[in-house]
Amino acid sequence: MENIRKTLITANGKITCLRCIAMSKRTRLQCGRPAMKLSKGQKCNFHGGKSTGPKTPEGKARISKAHLIHGNETVQIRLERKQKNAYFAHIEDAMHLLDMTTGSRKRGPKPNGYKPIKTIEEVRKRVLQHPVRCARIESFEGPL
Ligand SMILES: [Zn+2]
């Protein structure tokens, strides 16, 4: 870092300008391009001289929303999928606790937002909190 040159002399000594101060990770040498005039960090356009991206949370959210263009994926679709996967993982937990299935558990990473259900009491609470209950099971609900 001590051998950083701040200026670049080019055109056979006729032009002196600011030099990009970015260092190469591979060669450990300073970039040889002139820095951009409006660059705050004295960088060329390859090393962040044009823009270093949004800083405020609103700006980051706006850019994140604008750049999600992979197929039919959107933030909303990903959020709904994440919630459904967590919901089905909870159903799997409940089925195993209630001995409704004998199959093996789903392997691999669990979805985000998933908190394992470990007791039948937790299953009972979730059933009671669920907005859609087709048939109420009085013996299961117990005294409220
Ligand atoms: Zn550079």
Image (cartoon, rainbow, N blue to C red):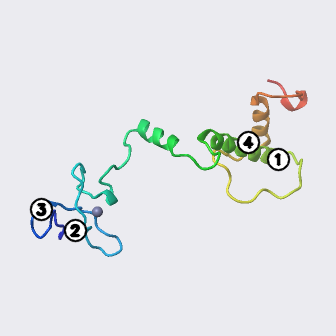
**In which quadrant of the rendered image does the C terminus lie?**
top right
Residue reaching furthest to the left: 14
The tag on residue 3 is none
Residue type beneath disc 4: Tyr
Q: Secondary structure at mark 2?
A: loop
Sequence-earlier tag: 2 or 3: 2
Instruction: Say which residue label 2 marks.
Output: 1
Q: Residue 96 at x, y = what percent?
A: 83, 49
Which residue is labeled 4 in the image? 87
Q: Quadrant of residue 136?
A: top right
Q: Which element type, helix, strand or loop, lies under badge 3? A: strand
Q: CA distance from mark 1 to mark 4?
A: 15 Å
Tell me how far mark 3 sits from mark 1, CA to CA: 75 Å
Residue drawn where x is 67% and y is 40% of the image: 80
* Residue position for label 3: 16
Going from the N terminus, do you reach mark 4 or mark 3 first? 3
Residue highlighted by disc 1 = 97
User: Which residue appears farthest toward the top when viewing the image?
Assistant: 144
Above/below status of 107 relative to 3: above
- 38 with respect to 131 (left or right): left
Q: Mark 4 against mark 2, which lies toward the viewer?
A: 2
State which quadrant residue 34 falls in.
bottom left
Q: Which residue is pictured at 33% across the width and 55% down the height?
A: 48
